[in-house]
Image: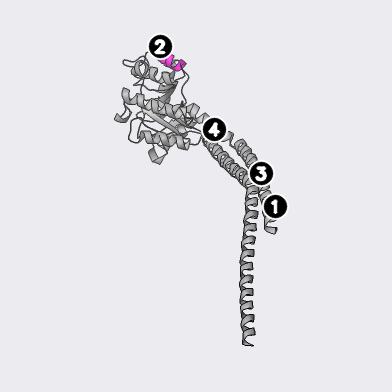
């Protein structure tokens, strides 16, 4: 009897061992089948995943392009606070080689034909080449008297009275705006008085207030870079009002080269104040159309990605079901 029990025990052990081995083998077979199934699923999903990644990148690029086009390029205005003859003899040829124009500030103390200033012919040549003019605010006379002086200056220079007023550093305050607006002026250039921004990104309504700084003032290059990244306008003053705007040939050439590099990259334009404001206004006017185009293209890309998701879900369910 004991022998029979021993035999049964051995048989049972062998059976259980065999059954265990069978289960282990079956699990391995099942695991291998799953691996094969997943490999086949991944093979089918892979091109769809790659296409979806491509569409995501395209959507990201589309958004960046929309942001860049909405922001636009920066603009730089080179404003000469006097009309020294050196502008024609030294500065004009250098700027012309880059296709840059400048803005000349006229005043009772600095006017074409005066000693040391541009001659009438030199001034005419510059304006015919696209250079623009502004008038300097004179805080030592009453506004109406100043306006009479400006009209006389324009008549002598044989130009239309500029609608742009340049305020020397520390002179501007908002109390002048009402008079200037009433008299038809459109631009008042300041130096950041009353915490007004030096870089201006909006065209705005009414009197425009672009900010200015000396072209070799501390941080000028950083401000120029900021204008390109913000799509804003910056005015560099060149003249003799204060040390940070005085002309120095080597540094001036370097500044022109730096500005030209930004221009070549499409991030900057060197223009006049009227042109800078017009550019910003055109950007604002076209924003709705850009937004609509962007939304339509984004929707099309999203529809393509949604369709890919549905295809991927179908493939996944097929293999999971199996």
**Residue receiving disc 4:** 281
Mark 2 and mark 4: Cα distance apart in space: 34 Å
Mark 3 and mark 1: Cα distance apart in space: 16 Å
Q: Nearer the viewer, residue 58 or 33?
A: 33
Residue 183 seen anywhere in this rendered image of the structure: no
Label 2: which secondary element? helix
Please state which of the two labelled residues, at mark 2 or mark 3, is closer to the viewer. 3
Label 3: which secondary element? helix
- Picture quarter with the N terminus: bottom right
The location of residue 27, given as percent across then percent down, is 62, 64
Dot 2, how many residues are within 10 Å of its Cα: few (below 14), some (14-19), or many (20+)?
few
Q: Which of the 4 image quarters holds residue 258?
A: top left
Q: Which of the labelled discs sits on residue 314, or is there none?
A: 1
State how many labels appear: 4
Please state which of the two labelled residues, at mark 1 or mark 2, is closer to the viewer. 1
Please state which of the two labelled residues, at mark 4 or mark 1, is closer to the viewer. 1
The location of residue 73, given as percent across then percent down, is 49, 32
Q: Please say whether residue 80 is one of the residues in the magenta stretch.
A: no
Mark 1 and mark 2: Cα distance apart in space: 79 Å
Please state which of the two labelled residues, at mark 3 or mark 1, is closer to the viewer. 1
Q: Which residues are magenta?
A: 115-129
Circles 3, 1 touching at the beta carbon (< 8 Å): no
- Picture quarter with the C terminus: bottom right
Vertical comparison of 319 with 155: above or below:
below
**Residue receiving disc 2:** 121
Tell whether 141 sits left or right of 47.
Answer: left
């Amino acid at each position: 009897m004991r022998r029979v029990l021993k035999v049964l025990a051995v048989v049972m052990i062998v059976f259980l061992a065999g059954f265990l081995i069978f289960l282990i083998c079956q699990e391995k077979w099942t695991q291998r089948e799953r691996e094969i199934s997943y490999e086949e699923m991944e093979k089918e999903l892979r091109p769809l995943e790659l296409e979806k990644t491509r569409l995501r990148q395209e959507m990201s690029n589309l958004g960046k392009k929309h942001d860049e086009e909405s922001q636009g390029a920066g603009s730089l205005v080179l404003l000469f606070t006097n009309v020294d003859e050196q502008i024609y003899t030294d500065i004009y040829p250098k700027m012309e080689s880059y296709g840059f124009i400048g803005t000349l500030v006229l005043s009772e103390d600095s006017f074409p034909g005066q000693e040391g200033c541009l001659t009438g012919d030199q001034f005419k040549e510059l304006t015919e080449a696209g250079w623009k003019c502004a008038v300097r605010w004179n805080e030592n006379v009453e506004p109406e008297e100043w306006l009479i002086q400006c009209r006389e200056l324009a008549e002598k220079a044989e130009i239309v009275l500029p609608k742009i007023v340049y305020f020397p550093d520390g002179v501007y305050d908002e109390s002048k705006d009402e008079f200037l607006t009433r008299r038809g002026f459109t631009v008042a250039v300041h130096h950041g008085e009353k915490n007004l921004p030096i870089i201006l990104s909006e065209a705005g309504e009414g009197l425009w207030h672009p900010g200015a700084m000396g072209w070799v003032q501390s941080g000028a290059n950083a401000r120029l870079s900021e204008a390109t990244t913000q799509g804003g306008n910056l005015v560099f003053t060149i003249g003799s009002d204060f040390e940070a705007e005085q002309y120095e040939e080597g540094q001036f050439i370097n500044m022109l080269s730096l500005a030209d590099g930004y221009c070549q990259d499409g991030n900057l334009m060197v223009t006049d104040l009227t042109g800078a404001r017009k550019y910003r206004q055109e950007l604002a006017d076209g924003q709705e159309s850009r937004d609509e185009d962007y939304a339509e293209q984004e929707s099309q890309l999203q529809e393509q990605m949604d369709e890919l998701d549905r295809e991927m879900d179908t493939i996944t369910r097929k293999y999971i079901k199996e």
